[in-house]
Image (cartoon, helix red, strand yellow):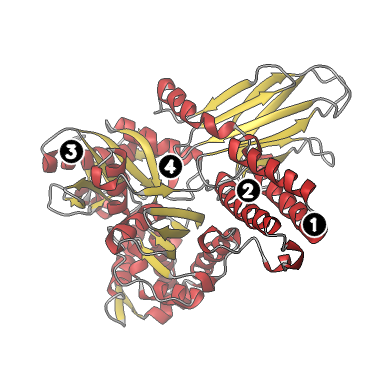
């Protein structure tokens, strides 16, 4: 049975499969690759999906829904033809249509898929996407971030070129921005940012409202049907502006014709607020990655809305880079999802390819806010843009005199106060009675790319209390199997064999040396231990290589009895090319 890749988009969705050493897009029943993400209930109760449903947005707005991806993971309910649907139920109908098209194309059952999601989707949205897959009859063990999928597709098409690229993914409803490093057979995501409420549909609405303002029409007073018609016309004009300008927008209103000549310059002016919102995530990823824009090798723009010349010009000026010409905005994410599906099925020609991703949101626990005990603050354990999978621990202490238990509340988000973040779960753990702040509690988070989070709390020699937070579609057996695979991450880097050996070696060298060499050994050892304390396995690995090289050189200098004449200040942590630390 084949595993397919699916780009479940706000405006359009499409599927792909890895076959015969390449990724192939899967056509739908109409022979098209793009299937509109729209659902409509016909008068006889039958369900329409795709273009037939999208065409009914204007004629039957009370029976049709689109853009429901924006509400994944929320309690919003869509009322269509007397029936109620959750966002994931509507998405499931689109996924089921794509699954049926794939089965017809491949001539075999399809029971599993890798689905792309916006990198900035939080856990509730990711869980809702997996539930949608399950409702569509698909096992969804793996989600891939949309910019990561696009980067994988670019890596496959361009070959093994070492590059730092920014993937700017502007779809119909969401914006994702990711910094990605590509080298040899590795595609490594460095930092992600985005806006889950910014996409092509926002430009359509902004154009429609700007037209109404200049034509003296009250957009909000129009019927829903008239609003949909106006927004559809705005979308058509927006698309036309990608190939020509000016474009004349003409609307009939109250027996008269209103018209306006649209240009890309007019659109930039009329949608200024949307362009400013685009700039913020693009700048944030460089700050999070501690990189400058000068280090960027390539700008990859994907997502249907990145076709807009105004968007391409604006981002090009912002980053000082022209977009790559062959980025395939409409299909890159689906192709990348199909490649990831091939990786999951262990296709022989993809076994060497490695994709590393990062945590899009910080994970932490609630701690006492001494300034306002009624408003706990979040203490971070796994910060955003940490490479996944990851395991981190921190030590907390009791907050009150004679405390007998602690309540560990788990949150996801970037805000200081827990109330402003997403609550994920809680774990209760008993603690021995003691004075305030005297009883330590070790808390460890272990998190993987599929949204599986294990929380452990231990006091003294007691067996750790445990909470497993997983999405509904993951079985308990699958969760346990995955946690067993992640168990190696739970050892603190300084307790692992290689770091322990390097630390012991450095301590011996310190004893044996004097003068400047002794001072340099102390400085390097202190730096190395600080890196290990970050509990970042990638940084720890790089630091171990740098530390070993320094020790090799220092011991060689001692053996030659020339170390007193060496200029140690010229040897820096960054020396060593590809092993330099970020």
* Foreground residue among 222 and 199: 199
Badge 3: residue crowd in 10 Å (few <14, some 14–19, many ≥20): some
Q: CA distance from mark 3 to mark 4?
A: 23 Å
Q: CA distance from mark 4 to mark 1?
A: 57 Å
Sequence-wise, the earlier of marks 4 and 2 is 4
Sequence-wise, the earlier of marks 3 and 1 is 3
Badge 4: residue crowd in 10 Å (few <14, some 14–19, many ≥20): many
Q: Which of the two discs, 4 and 2, sits closer to the camera?
A: 2
Q: Are marks 4 and 1 in contact (CB under 8 Å)?
A: no
Q: Which of the two discs, 3 and 1, sits closer to the camera?
A: 1
Q: CA distance from mark 2 to mark 1?
A: 40 Å
Q: Which of the two discs, 4 and 1, sits closer to the camera?
A: 1
The spot of residue 332 in percent (x, y) is: 30, 58
The circle drawn on residue 100 is 3
Drawn side of residue 386 relative to residue 219, left or right:
right
Q: CA distance from mark 3 to mark 2?
A: 40 Å
The spot of residue 503 in percent (x, y) is: 69, 43
Drawn side of residue 125 relative to residue 431, left or right:
left
Q: Quadrant of residue 344?
A: top left
Element assignment for label 1: helix
What residue does disc 1 label? Answer: 519
The circle drawn on residue 414 is 2
What residue does disc 4 label? Answer: 72
Q: Which of the two discs, 3 and 4, sits closer to the camera?
A: 3
Sequence-wise, the earlier of marks 3 and 2 is 3
Drawn side of residue 178 relative to residue 518, left or right:
left
Tell me the residue at 31%/52% (across/down).
336
């Amino acid at each position: 049975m084949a595993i397919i890749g699916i780009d479940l988009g706000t405006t359009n969705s499409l599927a792909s499969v890895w076959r015969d050493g390449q990724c192939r897009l899967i056509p739908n029943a109409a022979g098209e690759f793009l299937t509109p993400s729209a659902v409509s209930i016909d008068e006889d109760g039958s369900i329409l999906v795709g273009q037939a449903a999208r065409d009914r947005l204007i004629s039957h707005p009370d029976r049709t829904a689109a853009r429901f991806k924006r509400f994944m993971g929320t309690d919003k309910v869509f009322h269509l033809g007397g029936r109620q649907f959750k966002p994931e139920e509507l998405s499931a109908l689109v996924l089921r249509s794509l699954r049926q098209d794939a089965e017809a194309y491949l001539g075999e059952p399809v029971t599993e898929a890798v689905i792309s999601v916006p990198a900035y989707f939080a856990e509730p949205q990711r869980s809702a996407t997996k539930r949608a897959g399950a409702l569509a009859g698909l096992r969804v063990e793996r989600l891939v971030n949309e910019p990561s999928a696009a980067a994988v597709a670019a890596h496959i098409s361009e070959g093994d070129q070492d590059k730092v690229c920014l993937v700017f993914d502007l779809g119909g409803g969401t914006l994702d921005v990711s910094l990605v490093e590509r080298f040899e057979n590795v595609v490594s995501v460095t930092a992600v940012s985005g806006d889950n409420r910014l996409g092509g549909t926002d430009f359509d609405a902004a154009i429609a409202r700007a037209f109404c303002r200049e034509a003296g029409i009250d957009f909000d007073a129009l019927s829903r049907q008239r609003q949909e018609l106006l927004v559809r016309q705005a979308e058509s004009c927006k698309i036309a502006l990608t190939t020509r300008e000016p474009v004349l927008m003409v609307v009939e209103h109250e027996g008269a014709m209103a018209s306006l000549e649209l240009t890309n310059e007019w659109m930039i002016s009329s949608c200024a607020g949307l362009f400013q919102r685009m700039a913020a995530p693009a700048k944030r990823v460089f700050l999070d990655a501690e990189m400058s824009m000068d280090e960027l090798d390539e700008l990859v723009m994907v997502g249907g809305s990145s076709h807009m010349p105004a968007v391409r010009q604006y981002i090009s000026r912002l980053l000082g880079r022209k977009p790559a010409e062959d980025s395939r905005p409409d299909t890159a994410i689906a192709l990348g999802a199909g490649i990831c599906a091939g990786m999951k099925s262990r296709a022989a020609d993809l076994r060497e390819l490695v994709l590393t991703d990062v945590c899009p949101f910080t994970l932490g626990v609630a701690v006492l806010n001494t300034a306002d005990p009624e408003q706990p603050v979040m203490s971070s354990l796994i910060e955003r843009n940490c490479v996944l999978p990851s395991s981190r621990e921190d030590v907390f202490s009791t907050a009150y005199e004679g405390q007998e238990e602690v309540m560990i509340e788990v949150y996801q988000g970037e805000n200081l106060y827990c109330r402003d973040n997403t609550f994920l779960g809680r774990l209760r753990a008993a603690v021995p009675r003691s004075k305030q702040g005297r009883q330590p509690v070790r808390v460890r988070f272990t998190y993987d790319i599929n949204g599986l989070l294990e929380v452990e709390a231990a006091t003294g020699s007691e067996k750790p209390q445990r909470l497993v937070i997983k999405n509904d579609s993951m079985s308990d057996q699958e969760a346990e199997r995955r946690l067993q695979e992640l168990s190696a991450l739970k050892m603190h880097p300084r307790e692992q064999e290689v770091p322990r050996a390097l630390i012991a070696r450095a301590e011996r060298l310190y004893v044996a040396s004097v003068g400047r060499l002794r001072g340099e050994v102390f400085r390097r050892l202190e730096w190395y231990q600080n890196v290990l304390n970050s509990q970042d396995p990638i940084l720890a690995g790089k630091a171990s290589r740098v530390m070993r090289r320094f020790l090799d050189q220092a011991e060689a200098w001692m053996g030659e009895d020339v170390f007193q004449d060496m200029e140690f200040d010229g040897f820096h942590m960054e020396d060593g090319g590809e092993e330099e630390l970020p």
